[in-house]
Amino acid sequence: MARIELQNLAHSYRAHPRGPQDYALKTLNHTWEDGGAYALLGPSGCGKTTLLSIISGLVTPTEGRILFNGQDVTELETERRNIAQVFQFPVIYDTMTVQENLEFPLHNRGVPQAQIAARVREVAEMLELGPILGRKARGLTADSKQKISLGRGLVRADVNAILFDEPLTVIDPQLKWLLRSQLKLMHKRLNFTMVYVTHDQTEAMTFADKVVVMFEGSVVQIGTPEELFERPAHTFVGYFIGSPGMNVIPCEVNGDRALVAGHEIRLAARYAPPAQGGKVELGVRPEYIALSNNGHGLPVQVRRIDNIGRYKIARVDLAGHALNVMAMEDSRLDGSQARITFSPRHTHIYLDGHLLAGAAA
Ligand SMILES: Nc1ncnc2c1ncn2[C@@H]1O[C@H](COP(=O)(O)OP(=O)(O)OP(=O)(O)O)[C@@H](O)[C@H]1O
């Protein structure tokens, strides 16, 4: 397994890039730990596949270096990087049995037969492929074929990393859930360095120890699922993670108070008004706003209430700003006038999209 270092890495598909706008991947410096499970998460076109392709060797970066365990592999071709890859669609041999498919990557590398048998048994058991080991791959369902692909990626013990590119796209939704947790378990047991590309937040959150959130060619935050939820480093992370995402509204700041259309909101830290100007915004997740029919808080108009099972989502209007508020199913929300209060600890201030640290209040 390998520690993966990305040093001043940047990539443009243009022959003569003129500025940051021409880069599919903007300058990135990071070290991914040996044995870590990382998910690259972001919307279509944000640069996930470009970064994965640089790691796999399909793309040589325009700038910077990539190191596996301290060794510079930037110019090394894919075959010599000792990595396993699992793609969106199954890559298997139809005429071989499931067992032969799983054995193939090991036979190819001259692994002794006894080791092959043990390893294939272990991986087949984890992926629940045991009962169909003797069947030809041809004629199996798309789900089973993709499980074989996953197995072929996981069967080698000596790889530097396993790279997954949206591997569950073709999988039936019911089975998706199961496979995600199986992958997580396998990671715990086998301790591979894994990099997993997805645009699905649930997939990223279930699979990864660390989620790498990408937006417009930049990595905007690397953190545990909890960090991304509790303290989004960028308003994009706030929107993209959570359902519904974080509320973001323009505000002014003055010490430990935010001002929204003349209403004061208490904050857990102190902020100086930004010296250079810039767009100041307040971010708070629907989960951290309390809604009541009476008592303290800012006056809002309740526009709509959606019952989504355990929760209700109230769409409210605070002085012209639309906010989503999560309320327990049994909370009483009658009437169109209500009050809201924000949890100060979970109310963040952003300058031009980036989280401001604030000083102790
Ligand atoms: N071979 C290429 N030549 C030119 N531009 C490319 C090439 N591959 C990707 N791009 C551009 O680079 C940017 C990042 O693309 P990339 O495929 O890395 O994003 P992504 O996050 O993986 O998207 P998706 O989820 O749709 O695959 C996009 O603007 C895309 O159009």
Image: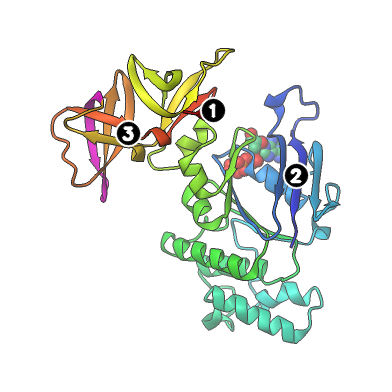
Marks 2 and 3 sit apart, C-alpha to C-alpha, by 38 Å
Q: Quadrant of ligand 1?
A: top right
On whether residue 107 falls in the magenta region, the answer is: no
- Magenta span of residues: 298-311
In the image, 296 versus 17, the foreground residue is 296
Kind of residue at disc 1: Leu
* Disc 1 target residue: 356
25 on left or right of 170: right
Residue 283 x %, y %? 43, 30
Q: Can I make out residue 200 in this image?
A: no
Residue 123 shown left or right of residue 260 in the figure: right
Q: Is residue 128 above or below residue 245?
A: below
Does the beta carbon at disc 3 come under 8 Å from ligand 1?
no
**Marked residue nearer the N-terminal end (2 or 3):** 2
State which tag comes first along the sequence, 2 or 1. 2
Q: Earlier in the sequence, mark 1 or mark 3?
A: 3
Q: Point out residue 277 in the picture as x, y percentages from the top left corner.
A: 55, 12
The amino acid beneath tag 2 is Leu
Element type at mark 2: strand
1 vs 3, front mark: 1
